[in-house]
Image (spheres, coloured by chain):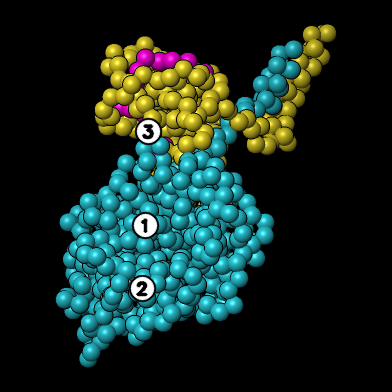
Chain colours: A yellow, B cyan
């Protein structure tokens, strides 16, 4: 019967395919290709400082944000000052930004920023950087959440800080929890390695967006730490 | 077709994102100092000095002893590390002191709490009345262990004690303890240590003929004249190897920087601008000199080779920058500058990039920065507490601590060399 060889051929073909499926990944087993997301921050709201004047100390953002403004440099002057309240942590600022993005933001008081704060008049009161570019929102949130907890012991000398580097592979669950982490490269300084482990343990990450959830759970994200 | 799709799925690997993290907050290491064992009086006194050294160093955050969970009688070597870890300690210091004749002998140890490892262990002996020395020496050993740099807890500082109508040169421990006045008359300013720490040069009006340079022995208090040129000689600065001396002198209504041998002999002028050139400060390699000149219209910081050649202007912001002090590490020059509110504050200038960093702001008048010999701290005078006193900060301006508590005031700090130089 002509059907018998055809079935046999089909079976053989399927066996070959499944064997290939099992063997080939091992043959080509290698680390997933690396991709560096762009970490972006909002430009700080402030007044451009005359370059001929001596600098002022860096001023943190005010406690409450003024209305959001696009992170584009401008030469317009900033509104007058108001008394400063408690400084929000980066985590709080990130939570607020995420809440606004999710439409859960509560009305915030209109508090003008410190008039002597360096930055751009068209920046955001919550801005933390002097310049910005469009970036990857989720990885920026991960970056900021870990950085919030990232404390380098001052006992490590400036000279040693120049050379310290460590890599950690972290797997992130759908709820934002770090499921596990592996130190891929130790720094050689026990107190620095301890500091970055603490940062990873304490960091509260937002849940990844659906298109990243699976890869972050299965392949993880590489965190390269330098002091 | 199905097979090819399946294969593609199996072989395709997802991108693994990489996030670079740098710029973590630099914060002191949480450190616990366990209650002392052995002789309580000596142990408690030495622990107090040790705690103050560590706290002022900016390297450690001392944990509140009230929070400790470990048994008070816990020994020096059998340690319940999880209990220390539970209170947040990353490092632990254990001490046990005994009085032996006229001395106090202390066993002092440093532990890594997370790993349960002893990091440092030593026996420190000091005269009973100078038990602080034992604490300072152990503290310096701890600093060296972590930073691989010398600590400054055994160093001394000099400054000017301001009185009612007079100003005197004073030396004290680095923390302002045990101040000793070295001079007794007239107005004496701008102390400068020799690299061996035995002698201090200073500017004085004692001879009635203007300001001139003198030296005072830091032990015997013997005063000698050093440079008596014209009616204005000031601002002594010894080269790091101790072989040369810089100062400013006014001749023919022109103030310039002069270079001489350590004893003041063989002076020669190394600047020749029509402006005022003063406040010379050596680079740590002795090859260059930072100084102040108003040759461009306003006082600004300049540098030049030690022979006066290769003059470069370093500051371009602000219209009154003065009192440069070159860091022992060579990377920074601290100075005081007057901002747009006409108040002097302390800044650092990165020698390589020219970047200015402000260390003080909105806290009175802050002047005359002076580096610690290991480059990890700065002293300066500040009116932030009302009276002008000497304050200590880290090079980024953080962790400010008052050093002196002079009745009228204190100014012009100068930090002595590391011990053993």
Q: CA distance from mark 2 to mark 1?
A: 29 Å
Quarter of image, res A117: top left
* Residue B283 part of the magenta segment: no
Q: Are marks 3 and 2 in contact (CB under 8 Å)?
A: no
| For marks 2 and 1 on the same chain, the one whose residue lies earlier in the sequence | 2
> Residue at 51% across / 60% down in the picture?
B253
Determine which quarter of the picture holds residue B304.
bottom right
Which image quarter holds the N terminus of chain B? top right
Asked whether residue A59 is drawn in magenta, I would say yes
Residue under the point 55% across and 42% down: B316
Q: Residue furthest top?
A: A2
Of badges 3 and 2, the one in the foreground is 2
The answer to whether dots 3 and 1 both sit on one chain is no
Which residue was labeled with disc 2?
Answer: B208
Name the subunit of mark 3. A
Judge depth for marks 3 and 1 and give the one in front: 1
Residue B372 percent location from the top left of the image: 43, 64
- Where's residue B267, x and y in %? 58, 74
Which residue is tagged 3?
A: A60
The front one of A9 and B332 is B332
Q: Say if B261 sits above or below A59 in the image.
A: below
Decide whether the magenta segment is chiefly helix, strand or loop.
loop
Compute the Cα span from label 3 to label 1. Answer: 25 Å
Q: CA distance from mark 3 to mark 2?
A: 52 Å
Residue B380, labelled with which disc? Answer: 1
Magenta part of the protein: which range?
A57-72
Would you place residue B11 above or below residue B232 in this image?
above
């Amino acid at each position: 019967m002509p059907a018998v060889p055809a079935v046999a051929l089909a079976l053989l073909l399927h066996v070959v395919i499944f064997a290939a499926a099992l063997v080939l990944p091992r043959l080509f087993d290698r680390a997933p290709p690396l991709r560096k997301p762009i970490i972006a921050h909002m430009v700080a709201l402030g007044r451009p400082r005359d370059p001929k004047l001596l600098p002022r100390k860096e001023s943190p953002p005010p406690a409450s944000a003024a209305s959001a403004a696009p992170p584009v440099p401008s030469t317009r002057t900033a509104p007058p000052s108001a008394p400063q309240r408690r400084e929000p942590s980066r985590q709080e600022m990130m939570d607020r930004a995420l809440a606004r993005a999710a439409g859960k933001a509560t009305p915030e008081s209109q508090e003008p920023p410190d008039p002597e704060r360096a930055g751009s008049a068209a920046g955001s009161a919550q801005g933390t950087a002097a310049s910005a570019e469009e970036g990857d929102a989720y990885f920026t949130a991960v970056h900021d959440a870990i950085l919030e907890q990232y404390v380098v012991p001052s006992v490590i000398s400036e000279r040693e800080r120049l050379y310290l580097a460590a890599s950690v592979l972290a797997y992130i669950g759908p709820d934002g929890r770090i499921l596990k982490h592996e130190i891929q490269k130790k720094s050689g300084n026990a107190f620095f390695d301890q500091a970055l482990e603490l940062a990873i343990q304490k960091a509260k990450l937002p849940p990844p967006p659906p298109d990243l959830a699976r890869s972050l759970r299965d392949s993880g994200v590489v965190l390269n730490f330098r002091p | 077709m199905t097979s090819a799709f399946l294969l593609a799925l199996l072989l395709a690997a997802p991108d693994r994102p990489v996030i670079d993290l740098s710029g973590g907050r630099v914060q002191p290491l949480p450190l616990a100092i366990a209650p002392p064992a052995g002789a309580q009086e000596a142990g408690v006194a030495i622990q107090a000095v040790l705690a103050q050294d560590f706290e002022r160093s900016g390297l450690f955050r001392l944990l509140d002893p009230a929070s400790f969970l470990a048994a008070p009688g816990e020994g020096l070597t059998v340690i319940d590390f999880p209990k220390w870890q539970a209170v947040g300690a990353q490092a632990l210091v254990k001490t046990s002191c005994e009085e032996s004749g006229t001395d106090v002998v202390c066993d002092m140890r440093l532990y890594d709490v997370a790993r349960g490892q002893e990091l440092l262990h030593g026996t420190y002996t000091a005269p009973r009345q100078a038990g602080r020395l034992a604490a300072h020496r152990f503290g310096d050993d701890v600093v060296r262990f972590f930073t691989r740099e010398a600590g400054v807890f055994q160093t001394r500082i000099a400054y000017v004690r301001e009185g009612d109508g007079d100003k005197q040169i004073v030396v004290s421990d680095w923390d302002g303890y045990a101040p000793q006045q070295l001079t007794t008359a007239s107005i004496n300013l701008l102390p400068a240590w020799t690299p061996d720490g035995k002698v201090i040069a200073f500017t004085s009006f004692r001879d009635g003929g203007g300001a001139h340079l003198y030296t005072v022995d830091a032990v015997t208090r013997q005063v000698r004249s050093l440079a008596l040129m014209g009616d204005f000689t000031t601002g002594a600065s010894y080269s790091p190897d101790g072989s040369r001396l810089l100062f400013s002198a006014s001749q023919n209504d022109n103030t310039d920087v002069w270079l001489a041998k350590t004893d003041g002999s063989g002076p020669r002028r190394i600047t020749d601008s029509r402006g005022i050139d003063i406040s010379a400060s050596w680079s740590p390699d002795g090859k260059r000199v930072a100084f102040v000149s108003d040759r461009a219209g306003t006082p600004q910081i300049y540098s030049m080779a030690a022979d006066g050649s290769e003059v470069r202007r370093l500051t371009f912001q602000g219209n009154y920058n003065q009192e440069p002090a070159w860091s022992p590490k060579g990377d920074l020059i601290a100075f005081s500058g007057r901002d747009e509110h006409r108040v002097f504050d302390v800044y650092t200038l990165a020698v390589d990039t020219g970047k200015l960093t402000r260390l003080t702001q909105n806290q009175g008048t802050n002047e005359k920065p002076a580096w610690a010999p290991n480059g990890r701290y700065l002293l300066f005078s500040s009116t932030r507490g009302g009276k002008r006193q000497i304050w200590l900060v880290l090079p980024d301006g953080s962790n400010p601590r008052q050093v002196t508590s002079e009745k009228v005031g204190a100014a012009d700090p100068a930090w002595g060399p590391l011990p053993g130089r």
